[in-house]
Amino acid sequence: MTPGTECTNVVILGSTGSIGRSALSVLAHDGLGHLKARGLSAHARWELLLEQAREVKPRFIALTDPAAAASVNGQLRGTGVEVLLGRDGIVRMVQDPETDRVLSAIVGAAGLEGTWAALEAGKLVALANKETLVVAGPLVMDLARRRKTTILPVDSEHSAIFQCLRGGAAREVKRVILTSSGGPFRGKTRRELAQVNPEQALKHPTWKMGPKISIDSATLMNKALEVIEARWLFDLRPEQIEVVVHPESVVHSMVEFVDGSVIAQLSPPDMRLPIQYAFTYPDRVDGPSPRLDLSRSCSLTFEPPDCETFPCLELGFEVMRRGGTAGAALNAANEAAVALFLEGAIGFLDIPRACRAALDHHPFDPWPSLDALWKVDAWARLEVGRWRP
């Protein structure tokens, strides 16, 4: 279905998060009715989900937290909005015959189930949940191929690469270069990082994001996960992927071709642009994102990442090379460690230490099944949970 000619029905998984709210802003800007919310989901933020449902009037909403679902009971009676519960509710929404595209924006490994269900039904997936490919990249991409459907990236870096790759054939690509803002602690020493508290780590210099991804950006784990995602999403060799620090966050990523040409995608840092592109691809339409004004004096700077101070980035490259269960172990350990850090139970530098330990000691399997990946996920969370004082 091509936006611009018919209505594209979109399910937004994680509609109360920062990506989900930006997606609804994109839909609100569409004054011609080309994009419509078919379904919205949240875990526990039922009050915001109710507000969204009353505003956009989707066919379904789904809540995965039982207490939140109980709070919603009866409040949408007479609106035509059906309230669904748990994983089954997510599956029903994404696999509904009227659903055209699914935005997978649930944070963490929990987003894998909804993405998998959408791909099984042959739905086009706009992927904002990088953990899906970090945990199960080969299996997910194989499922998309078998179901003859498409995964479109929503992360600003991967959307940029996707757009730049249209400038040449796959065989002509020499390397892709993901950019990183450097996070709130760019230029800091490890001694300084030892004193960091959650409030400081949550203050990202460029993007407004949820707490988990904000901490990942501070440790550079977010970039590590993006490296792994790029490996599977674009079928690249590990040596074809590099990272540079670009504090202005205007160049979202670059692709270098074999003849030396480098194509970059530039825009102000605003997630509504890559979200809209995933909703309307292959078309481009007017949208709510701000425009880049190159008539004003500005500079764009690039520098190599400091992998000694921020070891999480090297963990990402290691996992990309190893494959197998390494991604599941890294991701689960990181999610558990970030949660402990936000609680004040461990220090900032304990996050990469926990991830290193999980990679070194987990039961590695080079060719795991989906069930095996979930077992490694559970093992890593349990091990890191033991770090709690």
Image (spheres, rainbow, N blue to C red):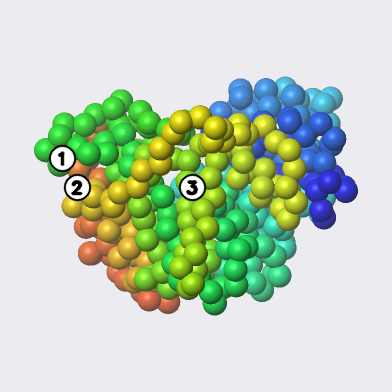
The residue located at (20%, 37%) in the rendering is 188
Please state if 77 lies on the left or on the right of 68 as rendered.
right
Q: Quadrant of residue 44?
A: top right
Q: Earlier in the sequence, mark 1 or mark 2?
A: 1
Position of the N terminus, as image quadrant, is: bottom right
Report whether residue 43 is seen: no
Q: Nearer the viewer, residue 180 or 202?
A: 180
Q: CA distance from mark 3 to mark 1?
A: 26 Å
Q: Residue type at mark 2: give it.
A: Thr
Q: Which mark is residue 309?
A: 2
Q: Which residue is mark 3?
A: 252
Mark 1 and mark 2 residues within 8 Å of each other at the beta carbon: yes
Q: Residue type at mark 1: give it.
A: Thr
* Position in image of residue 76 (x %, y %): 75, 25
Q: Nearer the viewer, residue 194 or 166?
A: 166
Q: Which mark is residue 189?
A: 1
Q: Earlier in the sequence, mark 3 or mark 1?
A: 1
Q: Nearer the viewer, residue 250 or 94?
A: 250
* Position in image of residue 64 (x %, y %): 58, 40
142 versus 62 height, above or below: below
Looking at the rendered structure, the secondary structure element under dot 1 is loop
The residue located at (67%, 62%) in the rendering is 150
* Position in image of residue 217 (x %, y %): 36, 41
Q: CA distance from mark 2 to mark 3?
A: 23 Å
Report whether residue 124 is seen: yes
* Position in image of residue 113 (x %, y %): 57, 55
Position of the C terminus, as image quadrant, is: top left
Q: Earlier in the sequence, mark 2 or mark 3?
A: 3
Q: Nearer the viewer, mark 3 or mark 1?
A: 3
Q: CA distance from mark 1 to mark 2?
A: 6 Å
